[in-house]
Image (spheres, rainbow, N blue to C red):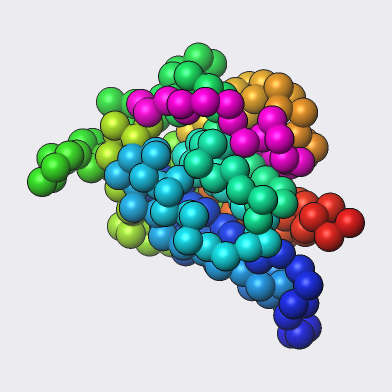
Amino acid sequence: MNATNSQSPTIVLVHGALTDASVWHGVIRLTQAAGHHVVAPSLPLRGLASDAAYLESVPGPIVLVAHSYAGSVISHPATLDPKVKALVFIAAFQPDAGESSAELNERFPGSKLGPATTTVVPRPGGNDMYLKPEAFGEVYAGDVAPDVVSVMAAAQRPIDPAALGETLPARATWHDLPSWALVSTRDLSLPPQLLGFTARRAESHIVEVESSHAVPVSHPREVTEVVLEAVRCALS
């Protein structure tokens, strides 16, 4: 393994709903092997504003990398800070002011996330939403080995569905920072049409990968290449 480059920004890998930081394990191994400092915090997944605030404790400089719902988190104006040098959206939402994850996902056809494939369980102070285990492979991880899908389905980190309905209170961060977007073209969670639309709107550098929504798991090398390109930009 190469020595960590102290001049490089920290790569902050932010997981989305229904998974935890383990979704990044392959990307972590590759970015560490390339000599970079990486952290992968566990989001509370209890509210968009509170999840954005949770990231404020990471010291800079940083490159924020988001998967899925976490794209809304790093788009939140609360994360706009001089320490953030670039944004990377991996099969992720890129909302703007007044938009929510839920509304964006319903705007375009193709998502199989919905009442038929999810279940909501009450908890003290809110609700937890899970993807039904029997639907996890088809909806989330269609190109992942069945034994890995089984583990992912069993180890889900639920999200309070209220977080998906929270809107950005002001202009998104991607207006003011360089950004990259990986579009997963076989995605049945976030429609590829949605991912392409928001990436073009944000004028992100776009890379397409023939993948399910679980692209950090099924294509860690391609994801890492996008992340490292953003890091190189941040260093220039």
Magenta-drawn segment: 165-187
Q: Nearer the viewer, residue 58 or 108?
A: 58
Vertical placement of 11 versus 125: above or below? Answer: below
Front-most of residues 110 and 162: 162
Magenta stretch containing residue 3, yes or no?
no
On the image, which quarter does residue 166 sit in? Answer: top left
Q: Quadrant of the C terminus?
A: bottom right
Q: Is residue 159 visible?
A: no
> Would you say residue 173 sits in the magenta stretch?
yes
Q: Where is residue 175 shown, x and y percent of the image?
A: 69, 30
In the image, what residue occupies the spot 78% across and 72% down?
7
Find residue 108 and report its image quarter: top right
Q: Is residue 124 left or right of residue 91?
A: left
Picture coordinates of residue 8 (x, y %)? 76, 68
Residue 81, relative to residue 206: is it above or below? below
Looking at the image, residue 4 lies above or below residue 61 = below
Residue shown at the point (47%, 28%) measured from the top left: 168
- Foreground residue, 46 or 149? 46
**Residue 13, quarter of the rendered image:** bottom right
Viewer-nearest residue: 33 or 210 = 33
Which residue extends farthest right? 236
Residue 234, percent from left and from top: 80, 55
Residue displayed at 58% across by 26% down: 171
Q: Is residue 98 visible from the viewing direction of this image? A: yes
Position in image of residue 158 (x %, y %): 30, 47
